Structure formats: structure tokens, C-alpha cells
Image (cartoon, rainbow, N blue to C red):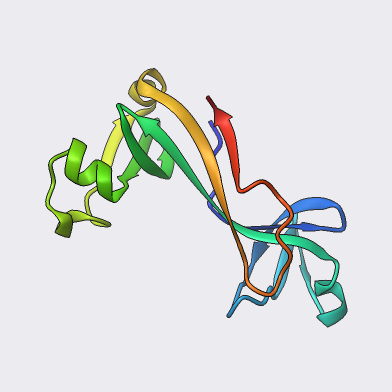
Amino acid sequence: MNFRSGYYGIYKGKERKLIGADGGIIIKIENNTKRIKLNHQDKKEIQSAYSVSTFCNYKSGKYFIENISNQKVLLNPDFNTLIEILGRHPYDHGVYRLEVTLEEFNKNVSSIWEEREKLSNFPFKVEKIEYLKK
């Protein structure tokens, strides 16, 4: 399973992973293994720029998918899930994580989606939410 997190943009008609964001200004753009340093004129060719976070509904709660590796999935619950479903203390928000096997995750996840947020000083011309699994 693939999931994304980080900065992305549409550059010359193709979606690329953006790197080196500093104060909302893109410094470099990744093109497969080649990295291109952008000058002021190149930045005008970025048609859309946004941050991507991947979320899921797992066992009735909303979680940020933090990492998937070694057949394990690391989930970070949103505030309501932490308090109402897991019964944890509000101080645990951002600290408490849930690690499950990939098999258990696949069996109990009902939906997976990306949430996209506009990067300042750039256009935002993509869907705000894209479902990967409904």
C-alpha cells in the first residue's frame, strides 16, 4: 500500500514531490531522481502547490497514517478518536500512537483518503480530498 505525506505540486503539467520549502517558497523540485533548483521564473510554472496528509477510518476512528514499514502501520489518532473512542487523556494528543500489523490494518480499515492544503503564495487547483479506498 502506498500513502503520501509532504509537499507536492503540479509543475509543467505533472505532479512532483516538492522539497526544500522555506516560508512557503519552493527551493527545489524532485523529478524522479533528478533535483532541479528553481529560479524565480520557474516558480511561475508551478500550477498548484499543496501539502498532503493521508488519513483513514480504522475501527470507527479517524487516524493520520504516519508510517508503513516492515508489515507494520503506525497510526496517529485525531483528537476526537483519542478521547471518545480510545478513552485517552487530552494530554496524549500528538504523543499516543497505535501500531498494528499491515494484515490487521487491511482487515479493519474502512476508508483511506488524502487531505490536501494549499501552500501559501501558490495556486491551489486540485481536489481538497481524494479517496484512495472507500
Which residue shows up at 13% across the image and 41% down it?
A: 87
Determine which quarter of the picture holds residue 33.
bottom right
Label count reads 0
Tell me which corner region of the image, top left, top right, bottom left or bottom right, holds residue 107. Answer: top left
Looking at the image, is 76 positioned above or below residue 40? Answer: above
Residue farthest to the top?
A: 107
Residue at image location 39% in from the left, 32% down from the top: 57
Q: Residue at x 79, y 75 (%)?
A: 38
Residue 30 seen anywhere in this rendered image of the structure:
yes
- Examine the image and state in which quarter residue 2 appears: top right
Q: Is residue 32 visible?
A: no
x 27%, y 57%: residue: 94
Which x, y percent locates residue 70? 40, 35
| Residue 130 screen position, x and y as percent | 61, 39
Determine whether, in the image, residue 84 is placed left or right of residue 120.
left
Above or below 10: residue 122: below
80 to the left or right of 23: left
